[in-house]
Structure formats: C-alpha cells, structure tokens
Image (spheres, rainbow, N blue to C red):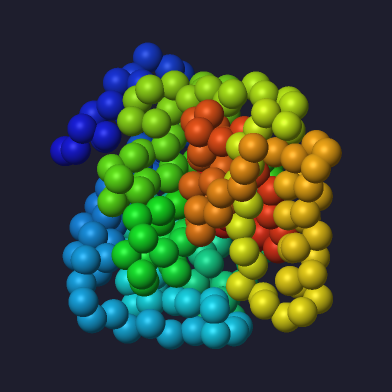
Amino acid sequence: RSNEYKSYLRACSEMSFQYEEEYRLAVELVMETANIFLPAFHSVKRNVQTKCCPTDLVTETDRKIEEVIRNKIRSRYPDHVFIGEETVSEGGGCVFGNSPTWIVDPIDGTTNFVHRYPHTCIVVGFSVSREVQFGVVYNPILKKLYTGKRGCGAYVNGEILRVTGETDITKSLIATGMSVKRDPETLNIRCGDITAVTQEPGACHGLRMMGSSVLAICAVAEGVVDAYFECGMHIWDMAA
C-alpha cells in the first residue's frame, strides 16, 4: 500500500473514534479509485460532456469512480444514505438528514482534470445527525492524502494540519474560485467580491484560483493560504 495510506494508519492508530470502520473504508476507496483516476488523467482521449452549461464538465471517469464508491458503500452499509455529485446531477435524490450519510465528489476540479492541471481530487465525507464526522480527500497526482475526523484533528499524509492564524487581510493570501455560471449578473457579483479584497486600502497580498473548492479549503487547513471564499457551493464541495 502507498506511503500516504501507511502515514494515515500511523496517524489514527492510537485514536479512539466511533466511526473508525467507515473512516478506513473511505481511505481505502479513494486510494483504490485513484487507479481509475490516474490513467484517465494522463490519457490523450477523454469522453467529456457538459451538465448545466458549457463550463460545467463531466467525464466518464467521474461517473466510473462514483459508481465504484457507491457500490462498495452500499454493499457494506445498505441502510446508509449516499449523496454523489454525479448521481444528483443526473436526477438522483439529495436528502441530507439525520441518517448516516456518505457524501462523494468523484472528481473535484473536473475542468482541471480535463486539462491535466494537477489540482484535482477524490472526495469522501461522512455525516451522522447532519454533522460531518470525517472527511477524506486524495489528490492522486500530487499524492497528497488529507484526512480529518471529528475531535481527532486533521492531517496530510500523516502530518498534522495547522492554519496560519492570520487575521489581517492586508497580510493575507486568499483563495477563491470561478463559478461555472458566466452570465453578466454572476460575473458582476464575482468581480465585486474580488474588488472588495484586492482594492486599496485594505488589499490582500494576492488571490489564487485553484479550480477545486475542496483543495482550496485543504490549502487553508494546511496553512498554504490564509482564507478562502466562494459562492454557489454544494454539499460535496465542503463535506470533507
């Protein structure tokens, strides 16, 4: 097994956690489906389609990874609820309630994936009583495994994550994103948001767009950027 997975096991081996079995399954799933992700990422040929608009992309790899994860979860936990980005986009239900719920984004940063830009990841979150209990994020390209569970801290490849603690916007590097919606009204709102944090006086040091909301949040946790803001996010963008 990979060094990232071994690091994860060391980090959690001495911690008691109610949902440890589910947590370990989530890690196994993202590592396993990386074997689907990686060949497709490096492939010249991709089957790329669109969803709600020309900039909202989906690939056969998104669907394949989600199918594998969904089937393995349902075989182990048939009574659990499953929320997957591609299942929902194709008309599946999205009921976020008190039952144990798995929340999956098979590829966050699909546009990055299509263009072979390495900031893209597989995401699995798990909630009970509408509270996230753990999250697992894996970037197979950069081989970075982010794991976090309620009350036990958060890690990247077994090393604990720490935010910068910076509260002064004029000393901050801030991440944001670009919505798939590109109509004039949405773009005006986004430009206004960007102006608010980059205009003097009180401007931040700079803005970064990673193309993956999940990895942007991980970057905040890792102390790579100081803050992140976005609009129009879905549950699978933040559950992990």
Front residue of 170 and 100: 170
Q: Where is residue 61 in the image (x, y as percent from the top left)?
A: 33, 71
Q: Quadrant of residue 9?
A: top left
In the image: residue 35, left or right of residue 74: left
Residue at the image point whose x is 30% and y is 45% from the top? 142
Q: State whether residue 228 appears in this view.
A: yes
Q: Position of residue 206 (x, y in %)?
A: 62, 43
Q: State whether residue 74 appears in this view.
A: no
Front residue of 179 and 75: 179
In the displayed structure, would residue 154 be above or below residue 178? above
Q: How many marks?
A: 0
In the image: residue 203, left or right of residue 212: right
Front residue of 26 and 208: 208
Residue at the image point whose x is 42% and y is 37% from the top? 146
Q: Which residue lies furthest to the top in this view?
A: 14
The quadrant of the picture occupied by the N terminus is top left
Residue at the image point whose x is 57% and y is 43% from the top? 217
Residue at the image point whose x is 51% and y is 64% from the top? 84
In the image: residue 164, left or right of residue 192: left
Q: Where is residue 136 in the image (x, y as percent from the top left)?
A: 44, 42
In the displayed structure, would residue 151 be above or below residue 204? above
Q: Residue furthest front?
A: 200
Q: Where is residue 191 in the image (x, y as percent from the top left)?
A: 75, 63
Front residue of 37 and 195: 195
Q: Residue furthest left?
A: 1
Q: In which quarter of the image is residue 156?
A: top left
